[in-house]
Amino acid sequence: MHKEQEHKLYIQSSIARSLPAMVRNELSTLSAQKQEEFVEEYKRKQKSLAVAYGCLLLLFASHYGYLKRRWMQRLFWLTWWWIVVWWFIDIFRLPWMVAEYNKDIAIEVMRNLKTISH
């Protein structure tokens, strides 16, 4: 009879809550060391909402560039007439945009970790 592998997350719950369910499930199958490797890489690549707001409010609305959406940044600047409207809307959309970016990064980091492990 095979012993079932114990599925447990060894990472901080605040980080685990911000990850997509698919990534959490995959993480729970990894060793504590591999989970720590994931967290280190994820923290290195993830974006901060505070910095994104700083880019939006203080750095001439460069928040799309910060989130590595360079084509959107160019489009944003090219629409001068509508820039105030975009800027206002993005004040409310920014938490969602940063969360989506970080979810994509979590998936990418997990994919890379699993590729390297195999």
Image: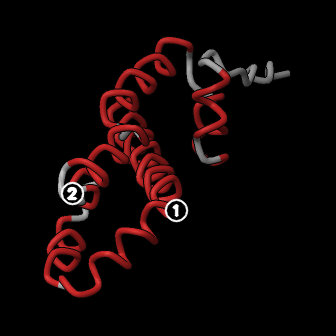
- Quadrant location, the C terminus: top left
State the image coordinates of residue 41 (x, y, percent, origin top left).
34, 28
Q: Is residue 53 above or below residue 93?
A: above
The secondary element bearing badge 1 is classed as helix
Left or right of 51 on screen, residue 103: right
Q: Amino acid at mark 1?
A: Phe
Q: What kind of element bears circle 2?
A: loop
The one of 85 and 8 positioned closer to us in this rendering: 85
- Relative to 81, 99 lies left or right: right
- The residue that label 1 is drawn on is 92
Callout 1 environment at 10 Å: few (<14), some (14 to 19), or many (20+)?
few
x, y percentage for residue 31?
A: 56, 17
Towards the viewer: 56 or 31: 56
In the picture, the disc for residue 79 is: none
Which residue is rendered at x = 24% and y = 50% of the image?
A: 66
Which residue corresponds to the image point at 16% horizontal and 75% vertical from the top-left? 77
Under mark 2, the amino acid is Ser
Q: Which mark is residue 62?
A: 2
Q: Is residue 31 above or below residue 25?
A: above
> Tags 2 and 1 in contact by the CB under 8 Å rule?
no
> Alpha-carbon distance for marks 2 and 1?
15 Å
